Image (cartoon, grey):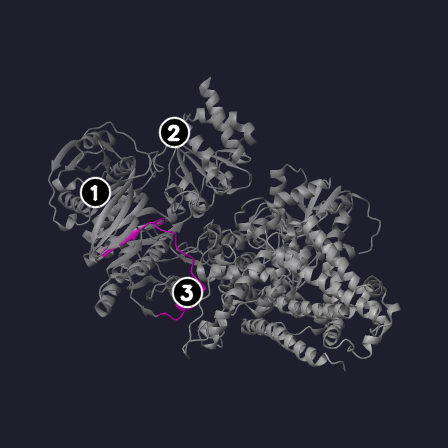
């Protein structure tokens, strides 16, 4: 089984978000970066597939040079090699990101054979575009399922489970396929240090695609203003129960 | 020469050969194990090491932390030392009743000492049996009790046969000692005077005596009594640098091949030689277990059982490990391409997973151990393997480690919020390129992000300003020191944080650091030197005490009754005990708790436990109850973790003491002082 | 004036709430122009859409559309948009809405903007959309002849116009390829209960609950209120509850009338999922916890004592 996992390096935002003076990016002066939460699970899923079925797992990203760190994070977990499409730091919209990744996938497949499965996170942790997976699938002509919370590969098919009202919908895709997973599909493992050290010497192929005209062009970012409100203290300890029930009654939820 | 010597000399030499040979076979095995152990740097500081031999081994200083067992051991230990020559004398005597050590064998004073110390041994054995069989203290639970009884019976019977032998010699009039110098042996002689065939009896008794000694010699290296032979070595090579420092692992030295990198303790093949000797030295006395806050509150952990478990597995698998190292099979078979040693994992074979995570690294076990065992090193090394190789550890710890890596603080808060605690204090935040302040105030993550922990930091900042100290904070450029990662066993994350901080501090040319957090204090002062960071690091209690001594802060008493809780990483690991007490005495009336100073009881937060779920009983509640029992009105602390843990403990036990950092009490006292007329106007 | 086509998700004769919000949003976009709604199969639901402001409702009927097939829906939507010459194609900002509209855009080779909160059609179309689960807004220009987008959940409230619409059924063209991705099986969830995303009341527990068994009083209170039980990320990571119960940026985003947060500190990641709540009641030992600043009502103290007391009080009031 040959698996490709596509990841995005996103700022490790915690709490208050601060923007750069031009308002076009998050100020990352004091922030680290991480693999997006859904993609972290996609990496784990890719590693598990290769552990179960043998084969090779490859990771790819489009992002600035610092995204190499997140590629190494994935390599530390057991991915064999990485493909880095290096950008100059300017943001790429989802359409051009998908197109560049598709070019890279085609080139890699021409050289080292097709991928049975391409895994992604359901949506990017930062830009939340919800579309790279379906664009990659469409361009490659491969069936695509998003929002996957359960995955098993068996011979030539992928059984994908998607949460739905009161249960799970099951899709069966013929491989090769594109699968976008949601956080919660697994609990990503913590990287071992021998794994991290080995990751330093694993191969990373780099290229510099040029950024095309943007279909969805980000103009600026805005931190939403939370409306300042004053909480009403209903009391301390169990003695507050009658006051709470009165509030429940007034809200009509009792 | 009497005729029997033709038989007895070769016979005894044969017995001696067999016994010493059996001893040496075992001793060689143990020595080979130790030589196969991983490296551990233990050189230098010869005067300190020598002093420890004198005070700790000869003087038995740590044994006297408990009076009666200490006295018992002193009798056995010095008895053994003084009686050593009688072993040789008995061997000679067994071969020929007239042979003894020239000169010494004829000295009356030596005869007197032998009598006295031999009686001491019998008293010691009696006390030991009384403790073990009568009092049955909890500390012996899990120890090999029968082995201990065997050892005591050996000691008693060797001593009794010594008296019988000396007595029968005196009765026969063939002893070299002047009998008047040996009152006990003389009394034995009187009792033995009417024994028929006393000449035969004397022969039999000396042979029994000598054979018991030789049997004991063979038995010793299989038992905890091995400590008598290796304690000298173990105490000598005990760490001399700060007790709070952990030995760094080396990940990126090009000189170390990849398969030789050590990631902590996974199998016995990963043990350092010191860890091996620790196990060989353990007497199973359980003093560590008695002092352990985790054991005390019903957790799985007993430091004693950890050390014993590792030792037992080392003994079990050691032959296979050495055979593999020799390139031969476990039975001596196999060729040049011998088997690779596949040790069973120490966790959970010797130590359960849960046990490894119970430890708060408070250091009570290390402090109590009379034979120089360093339990924390074993436990942290086990954690290192679980975290860095197995990725197997409590899930809540994974959150903390990921947060540390991503946000440089263990709560996953935004680094930009690091200065929020100081809102309104008008502190200087050191930007790159700014001139270095006299003192850098290292805030730490807990004061920066925790609402309760920050009160101590705010108080400290206010006092520094009050005293006119030139200081600054690093603000968002400060990262966690890495202490929680390191104590969790994630040495890798620790080292990356340590290097980052050392670089930041170096860029800003920092030379002196004050911090309110004993964990930051310990890491920066004791561990950063391993990464090139050398600073003068003071705890805020030390710094503030100095400001009072210099008259730069003028507190007025009136703070009520205060009991001070010693932080483990301050009082035990770093010997800061006097200054916080100075501050407490300056602001109120001190009342001490029983467990204090170098023997305090942990708050429960150390060893990354601030971020781990506590199973079974709560350590902080136990400590809160102890503080409440003093009847004080305030529980003073000098650590942000202790602040949070003991405040929680007070709330859940309904203790009613107010938990405050010493600095906060000092702010109140300085404000009281301001209200009073200033008498001494000198600066 | 613009022609806008809205994809409306339905279930058993009822249009889903977020789709109705999208329909309301689309009315603004159309600015007096036609608002077309596409419904797959569900004629009963289609009949209700006129009152929600659709001017024309198209019902696609096809024998192979019994089970969800996102590519098929995307094709139907695209073909219909072409037929109508729609200036904008709009869908609900839900998991399925986003994937269908994204597929529709991919087929057409057009850009797609997910989770918009404000849109002004033009050349280019300018819009505001959610990033970071709503912690950040993006202002963007959409360079496309046809704007394809979804409307963020709860960006607007669904409002009725009381109008009516012609309902027109049609049979879409579909190939085997459009049906390659479709639901072939359904696994029922283990136990019934109120779905977190749709619950009118959610009772959640955080790290402060302390253990898996500590959720018993929270379950009890939720049972009394007909509420769903949620939790914070710390809880799922500790293994006390399954990830499906997690409220947060990377869990379920909720929009109840009342959110009762017990022992939850209110980390950003959590609040990103709870910001749809109309009212928040926080129960926490720590009066300084961030959740207290976001809450409308606060009880300070140990949840293990307070939650059972509230349940007891509810029983007492109801019994009276």
Q: In what quadrant of the picture does the C terminus of chain B appear?
A: bottom right
| Helix, strand or loop at mark 1 | loop
Residue furthest out toward the right? B180
Q: Are marks 1 and 3 in contact (CB under 8 Å)?
A: no
Badge 3: few (under 14), some or many (20 or more) residues near its Cα, within 10 Å?
Answer: some
Q: Which residues are magenta?
A: A177-202
Q: Are marks 2 and 3 in contact (CB under 8 Å)?
A: no
Badge 2: few (under 14), some or many (20 or more) residues near its Cα, within 10 Å?
Answer: some
Residue sitting at x 37%, y 38% = C254
Badge 1: few (under 14), some or many (20 or more) residues near its Cα, within 10 Å?
Answer: some
Say whether disc 1 or disc 2 marks the residue closer to the N-terminus.
1
State the mark number for residue C226.
Answer: 2
| Helix, strand or loop at mark 2 | loop
Q: Left of A84 or right of it: where is B459?
A: right
In this view, the mark in front (2 or 3): 3
Q: CA distance from mark 2 to mark 3?
A: 48 Å
Residue furthest out toward the top? C320
State the mark number for residue A195.
Answer: 3
Chain containing the residue with disc 2: C
Is residue B511 within the magenta segment?
no
Q: Mark 2 vs mark 3: same chain?
A: no
Q: B676 or A7: nearer the eye? A: A7
Q: CA distance from mark 1 to mark 3?
A: 41 Å
Chain containing the residue with disc 1: C
Q: In what quadrant of the picture does the N terminus of chain B appear?
A: bottom right
Q: Where is residue B58 shown, x and y percent of the image? A: 75, 67
**Residue on which disc 1 sits:** C68
Q: CA distance from mark 1 to mark 2?
A: 29 Å
């Amino acid at each position: 089984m040959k698996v490709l996992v596509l990841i995005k390096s996103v700022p490790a935002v915690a709490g208050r978000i601060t923007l750069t003076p031009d308002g076009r990016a998050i100020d990352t002066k004091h922030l680290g970066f991480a693999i997006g939460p859904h993609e972290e699970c996609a990496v784990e899923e890719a590693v598990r597939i290769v552990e179960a079925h043998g084969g090779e797992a490859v990771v790819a990203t489009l992002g600035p040079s610092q995204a190499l760190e997140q590629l190494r994070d994935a390599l530390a977990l057991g991915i064999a090699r990485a493909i880095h499409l290096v950008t100059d730091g300017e943001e790429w919209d989802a359409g051009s990101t998908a197109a560049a990744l598709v070019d890279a996938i085609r080139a890699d497949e021409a050289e080292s054979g097709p991928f049975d499965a391409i895994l992604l996170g359901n949506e990017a942790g930062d830009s939340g575009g919800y579309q790279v997976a379906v664009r990659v699938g469409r361009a490659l002509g491969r069936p695509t399922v998003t929002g996957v919370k359960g995955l098993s590969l068996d011979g030539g098919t992928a059984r994908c489970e998607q949460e739905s009202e009161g249960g799970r919908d099951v899709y069966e895709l013929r491989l090769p396929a594109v699968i976008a997973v949601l956080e919660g599909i697994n609990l990503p493992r913590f990287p071992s240090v021998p794994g991290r050290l080995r990751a330093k010497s694993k191969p990373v192929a780099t290229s510099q695609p040029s950024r095309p005209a943007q279909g969805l062009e980000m103009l600026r970012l805005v931190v939403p203003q939370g409306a300042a409100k004053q909480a009403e203290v209903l009391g301390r300890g169990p003695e507050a129960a009658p006051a709470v029930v009165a509030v429940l009654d007034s809200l009509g939820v009792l | 020469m009497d005729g029997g010597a033709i038989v007895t000399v070769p016979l005894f030499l044969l017995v001696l050969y067999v016994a010493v040979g059996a001893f040496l076979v075992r001793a060689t095995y143990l020595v080979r194990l130790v030589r196969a152990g991983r490296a551990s740097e233990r050189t230098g500081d010869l005067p300190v090491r020598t002093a420890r031999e004198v005070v700790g081994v000869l003087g038995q200083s740590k044994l006297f932390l408990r009076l009666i067992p200490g006295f018992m051991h002193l009798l056995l230990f010095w008895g053994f030392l003084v009686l050593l020559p009688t072993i040789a004398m008995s061997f000679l005597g067994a071969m020929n009743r007239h042979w003894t050590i020239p000169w010494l064998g004829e000295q009356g004073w030596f005869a007197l000492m032998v009598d006295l110390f031999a009686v001491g041994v019998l008293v010691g054995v009696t006390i030991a049996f009384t403790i073990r069989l009568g009092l049955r203290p909890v500390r012996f639970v899990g120890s090999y009790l029968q082995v201990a009884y065997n050892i005591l019976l050996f000691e008693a019977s060797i001593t009794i046969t010594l008296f019988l032998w000396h007595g029968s010699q005196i009765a026969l009039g063939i002893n070299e000692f002047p009998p008047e110098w040996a009152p006990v042996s003389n009394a034995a002689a009187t009792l033995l005077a009417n024994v028929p065939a006393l000449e035969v009896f004397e022969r039999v008794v000396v042979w029994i005596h000598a054979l018991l000694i030789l049997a004991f010699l063979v038995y010793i290296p299989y038992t905890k009594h091995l400590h008598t032979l290796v304690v000298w070595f173990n105490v000598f090579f005990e760490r001399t640098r700060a007790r709070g420092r952990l030995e760094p692992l080396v990940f990126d030295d090009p000189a170390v091949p990849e398969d030789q990198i050590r990631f902590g303790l996974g199998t016995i093949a990963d043990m350092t030689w010191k860890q091996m000797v620790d196990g060989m030295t353990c007497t199973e006395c359980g003093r560590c277990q008695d002092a352990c806050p985790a054991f005390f509150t019903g957790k799985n952990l007993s430091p004693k059982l950890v050390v014993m478990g590792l030792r037992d597995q080392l003994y079990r698998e050691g032959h296979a490990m050495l055979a593999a190292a020799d390139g031969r099979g476990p039975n001596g078979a196999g060729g040049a391409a011998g088997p690779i040693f596949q040790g069973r994992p120490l966790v959970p074979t010797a130590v359960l997973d849960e046990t490894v995570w119970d430890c708060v690294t408070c250091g009570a076990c290390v402090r109590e151990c009379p034979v120089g065992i360093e339990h924390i090193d074993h436990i942290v090394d086990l954690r290192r393997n679980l975290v860095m190789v197995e990725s197997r550890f409590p899930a809540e710890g994974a959150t903390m480690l990921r947060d540390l890596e991503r946000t440089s603080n263990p709560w996953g808060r935004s680094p930009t919020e690091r200065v929020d605690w100081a809102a309104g204090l008008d502190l200087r935040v050191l930007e790159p390129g700014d001139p270095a302040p006299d003192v850098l105030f290292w805030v730490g993550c807990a004061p920066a992000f925790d609402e309760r922990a920050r009160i101590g930091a705010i108080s400290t900042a206010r006092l520094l300003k009050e005293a006119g100290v030139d200081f600054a904070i690093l603000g968002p450029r400060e990262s966690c020191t890495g202490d929680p990662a390191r104590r969790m066993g994630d040495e890798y994350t620790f080292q990356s944080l340590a290097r980052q901080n050392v670089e930041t501090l170096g860029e800003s040319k920092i030379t002196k650091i004050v911090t309110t957090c004993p964990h930051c204090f310990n890491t920066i002062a004791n561990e950063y030197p391993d990464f090139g960071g050398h600073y003068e690091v003071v705890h805020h209690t030390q710094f503030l005490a100095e400001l009072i001594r210099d008259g730069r802060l003028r507190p007025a008493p009136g703070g009520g009754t205060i009991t001070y809780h010693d932080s483990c990483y301050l009082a035990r690991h770093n010997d800061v005990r006097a200054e916080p007490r100075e501050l407490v005495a300056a602001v109120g009336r001190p009342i001490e708790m029983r467990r204090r100073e170098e023997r305090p009881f942990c708050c429960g937060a150390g060893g990354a436990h601030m971020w781990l779920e506590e199973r079974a009983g709560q350590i902080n509640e136990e400590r809160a109850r102890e503080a409440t029992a003093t009847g004080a009105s305030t529980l003073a602390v000098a650590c942000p973790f202790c602040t949070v843990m003991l405040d929680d403990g007070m709330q859940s036990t309904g203790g009613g003491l107010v938990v405050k950092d010493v600095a906060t009490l000092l702010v109140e006292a300085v404000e009281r002082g301001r209200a009073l007329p200033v008498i001494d106007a000198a600066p | 004036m613009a022609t806008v086509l809205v994809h409306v998700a339905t279930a058993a004769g009822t249009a889903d709430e977020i789709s109705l919000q999208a329909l309301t949003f689309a009315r603004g976009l159309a600015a007096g122009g036609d608002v077309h709604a596409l419904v797959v199969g569900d004629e009963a639901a289609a009949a209700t859409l006129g009152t929600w402001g659709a001017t024309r409702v198209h019902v696609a009927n096809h024998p192979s559309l019994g089970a969800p097939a996102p590519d098929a829906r995307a094709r139907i939507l695209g073909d219909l948009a072409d037929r109508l010459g729609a200036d904008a194609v709009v869908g609900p900002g839900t998991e399925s809405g986003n994937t269908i509209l994204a597929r529709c855009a991919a087929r057409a080779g057009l850009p797609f903007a997910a989770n918009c909160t404000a849109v002004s059609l033009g050349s280019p179309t300018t819009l505001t959309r959610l990033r970071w689960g709503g912690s950040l807004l993006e202002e963007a220009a959409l360079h496309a002849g046809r704007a394809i987008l979804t409307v963020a959940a709860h960006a607007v409230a669904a409002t009725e116009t009381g109008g009516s619409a012609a309902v027109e059924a049609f049979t879409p063209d579909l190939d085997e390829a459009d049906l390659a991705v479709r639901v072939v099986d359904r696994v029922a969830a283990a136990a019934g209960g109120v779905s977190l995303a749709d619950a009118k009341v959610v009772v959640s527990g955080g790290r402060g609950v302390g253990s898996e068994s500590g959720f018993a009083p929270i379950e009890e209170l939720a049972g009394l209120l007909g509420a769903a039980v949620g939790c914070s990320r710390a809880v799922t990571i500790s293994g006390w509850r399954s990830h499906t119960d997690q409220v947060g940026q990377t869990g379920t985003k909720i929009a109840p009338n009342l959110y009762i947060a017990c022992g939850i500190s209110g980390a950003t990641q959590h609040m990103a999922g709870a910001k749809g709540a109309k009212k928040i009641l926080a129960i926490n030992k720590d009066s300084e916890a961030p959740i207290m600043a976001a809450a409308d009502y606060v009880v300070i103290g140990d949840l293990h004592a307070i939650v059972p007391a509230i349940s007891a009080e509810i029983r007492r009031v109801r019994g009276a």
